[in-house]
Image (tube, grey):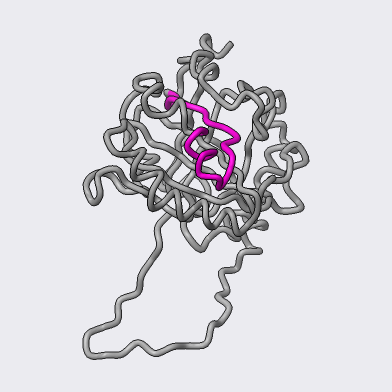
Amino acid sequence: MTADSTDTPAGSAAEPAAETAVDTRAATYAELAAIGPYGVHPGHALMAMPWIFAGRRWVATRALQLLRYPEESAVARPVTAGCYLSTYWLTEGRYDEHMRWTVAINRRLNRDGRIHQDRTHVFTAFQDHVATVYRDGAEGPRDFHALDHPYAGLVLEVIDAAGPRERAELLAWLRTRHLPQRLAGSPAAMVTVFRPTPLPGDRMTYVKQVEGVETRLTLLWFLQQEPREGWAAHFADLGRDVAESGLGRVELVAPFVPTVPGTDRYVAELR
């Protein structure tokens, strides 16, 4: 997710303009998702769903699940619950259009028996990007590359603040102090920070409504090595730092490695 900027042409001046609603025809996406082909066989190439421009699936083997904390988590009960994590980048400003499509297509998939129901959604949420902090400054991949770059691991961190004001203070502390200090010399090249948004009322019933919309932050640490390498030195005590700041409580720290699409690699290591 990136913020766009508009350049003022040479010799002209930028003048303030009254805000006007932009018609993106979001309602049309619900109609389009209900008709036409929607199989998984490759026929063309660009995006899997409207306005998703990158995606990656991650897996937590049993060894990685056992590294998670805190034991009493508000997100995962028990803290080892959940083996797979899917992450997607959506084009900024296209949330409504994508949401119309995804609700409609999931209803169709469910009706046609193409959704695997024998699973539990532990932490499913759309999120708004609020910050990215880089270890190496201007060097290396940017956040919009993160799901395409061959990172060797990912650490999901969820932090709850006491309220909206405290969350704003927490975000400022993360951006200016905690994350730059933690990234220095670590195997993580960047951390992206998000805040959750509520799911629509017509979502699929097996997905629960998002909690902590006003108080929660979600962090994704992108690693250049397998999470267990350097875990004790860099990630085992993230909760302590947040607690000592007095700005929030870490509710989940969970490491993952990327899946290998089209294979059963890691399946035998999940339990």
The one of 104 and 159 positioned closer to us in this rendering: 159
Task: Examine the image and state in which quarter residue 258 appears.
Answer: top left
Q: Position of residue 180 (x, y in %)?
A: 34, 45
Residue drawn 63% across and 36% down?
123
Specify whether 117 is left or right of 80: right
Q: How many marks?
A: 0
Specify whether 128 is left or right of 210: left
The one of 59 and 114 positioned closer to us in this rendering: 59
Q: Is residue 75 magenta?
A: no
Q: Quadrant of the N terminus?
A: bottom left
Q: Position of residue 151 (x, y in %)?
A: 34, 32
Task: Examine the image and state in which quarter residue 106 appears.
Answer: top right
Q: Is residue 240 magenta?
A: yes
Q: Quadrant of the C terminus?
A: top right
Residue drawn 71% across and 23% down?
118
Specify whether 224 is left or right of 241: left
Q: Position of residue 25 (x, y in %)?
A: 60, 68
What segment is highlighted magenta in the picture?
239-259
The one of 222 and 108 positioned closer to us in this rendering: 222
The one of 235 and 97 positioned closer to us in this rendering: 235
Q: Position of residue 202 (x, y in %)?
A: 76, 51
